[in-house]
Image (cartoon, helix red, strand yellow):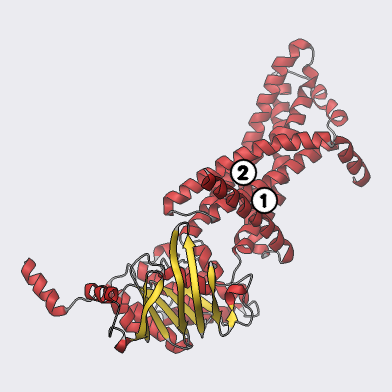
Amino acid sequence: MTGSLFQFLSSVGDYVLLIIGVIWVSMRRPPAWILIRDQLFDIGVMSLPVVAITGFSTGMVLAAQSYFQLSDKGLASATGLMVTKAMLVELGPVLTAFMVTGRVGASMCAELGTMRVTEQIDALRSMAVNPLRYLVAPRFIAGILMMPLLTVFSAIMGILGGYMIAVGYYGMSPSSFIDPLPLHVTRFDFFSGIIKSIVFAGIIVTISCYKGMTTHGGAAGVGRSTTNSVVICYSIILISNFLLTLGLNTSYDYINDFLNRWF
Amino acid sequence: MIHVHEVWKRYGKLEVLKGLSIDIFDGETLVILGRSGVGKSVLLKQIIGLEMPDKGYVEVDGTRVTDLTARTFRPGLKPMGMLFQGSALFDSMDVGQNTSFYLRQHDPSLSPSEVKDRVAHALKMVGLEGIEGKMPSELSGGMRKRAALARLIVYRPQIILYDEPTTGLDPITSMQINDLINQTKKELHATSIVVTHDIRSALAVGDRLAFHSDGKIAQIGLKSEFLQNGDPLLHEFFNNAIIDKVELERQLQNSS
């Protein structure tokens, strides 16, 4: 019991050191642009289809349910608002994070895990190349840059899907879907979604890379690490989403002041 | 000179190195023999800085490298290289990119044509000319080892560590690797440490031999004097490893 607790605390310590290390190397001497570019493409461009599909279908479901549940209470006009707010603040960031975890995080963990068990990471270090700078930092930077864009894209696809269902299928007028949006969808909503997506990007990349770089036990070990990293990412994303929602909503006034001052 | 001073290393409850000390002189090839799992590769990792000893230190030319915080970054120190047991070629890169990796990372002043020439020279030296475009997965075990050696040769390290260079290879390929180790030493004038349990390889490449047993160096000496007054475990190791040709023919006749 004490041994397991010690091991857990030691892993958390190593993980925190990895985060500090990757931020430090990224700021001190950023990795080569070509490495970041490849990751931008892999994390961002290659994730577009899956993010589009999930965003679009979630938007459609949201609109269908909202309209169905609200219309008999005379609240059908809230459908557009409901879809937009939900996609921007909650579902967009979380669903995108889930999709990126499954598509990119798992692949990062498996790739780094394989490199670890086949001594490729040791080979990098033996040639005086810091694996944090060469392997983790490009993924970290690309993740932080791409996740907000993917989240916005997912939200747009969701709103589009919601609009199609509400207007095209349920016959809602376009103006009653769109008109409430400028009034009630605030910069705070947008800011919340972006902040969440940045935090989720950090979580996905660092956990996936940490689990990959600490893999041991051959091919079976790579499989184990990959599964663990995905499960841990999902759990931490959900928990941190709750904490972020609570924290951001509590800080509403400060954030609004900040946004009014700077934007 | 490399000076390993009373290095201790433990993994969980398993004490692998127990105050191991050894000196490796400039330009020599020291072969460290020992049974599988005694910690020979662990010793190499302490020397090159992939792991930190629990106690003790490693000095390279008087500089205590185990005190350096980022030990893989050692400006002013002799460049080191390691040939890994599984070759450790980067499987996302082709052989050319693997071979040029160090130069691309550390020598941006080199023009692409210079890099190309040096890569071609290194690959030629290991007998793999013209395979720059092949991926590591397309190579055989022996070719992978040779490509990994080319990746080292290209940046001319002054200290080369070989981790089980002939393990898993057939006897002919093993002899080719041994020849390459000797040729590399001659060309680069490098200090080499070879960790192996292959006696033939040890005799083919070593200037001095050391026997690693129970976390320490139990015996060390020139090849000619190595077996005199030796550790009993060492004699057992040798007796079981060397196949006498006459004995082999007798055994083959008996079995038929």
Quadrant position of the C terminus of chain B in the picture: bottom left
State which quadrant residue B237 falls in: bottom left
Q: Is A12 placed left or right of A224 in the picture?
A: right
User: Which percent across, then down, holds residue A225?
Assistant: 51, 48
Q: Is residue B230 visible to the viewer in this orientation of the structure?
A: yes
User: Which percent across, then down, holds residue A24?
Assistant: 71, 61
Q: Are marks 2 and 1 in contact (CB under 8 Å)?
A: yes
Name above or below for residue B109 compared with residue A136.
below
Q: Nearer the viewer, residue B57 or A83?
A: B57
Name above or below for residue A236 compared with residue B83.
above
Q: Work out how far the residue at label 2 is from the one at label 1, CA to CA, in angstroms.
A: 9 Å
Q: How many marks?
A: 2
Question: Element under label 1?
Answer: helix
- Circle 1 Cα neighbour tier, 10 Å, few/some/many (<14 / 14–19 / ≥20): many
In the picture of the structure, the residue carrying the numbered disc 2 is A100
Q: Is B115 placed left or right of B233 in the picture?
A: right
The residue that appears at 40% across and 86% down in the rendered structure is B183
Question: Element under label 2?
Answer: helix
In the picture of the structure, the residue carrying the numbered disc 1 is A143
Q: Amino acid at mark 1?
A: Gly
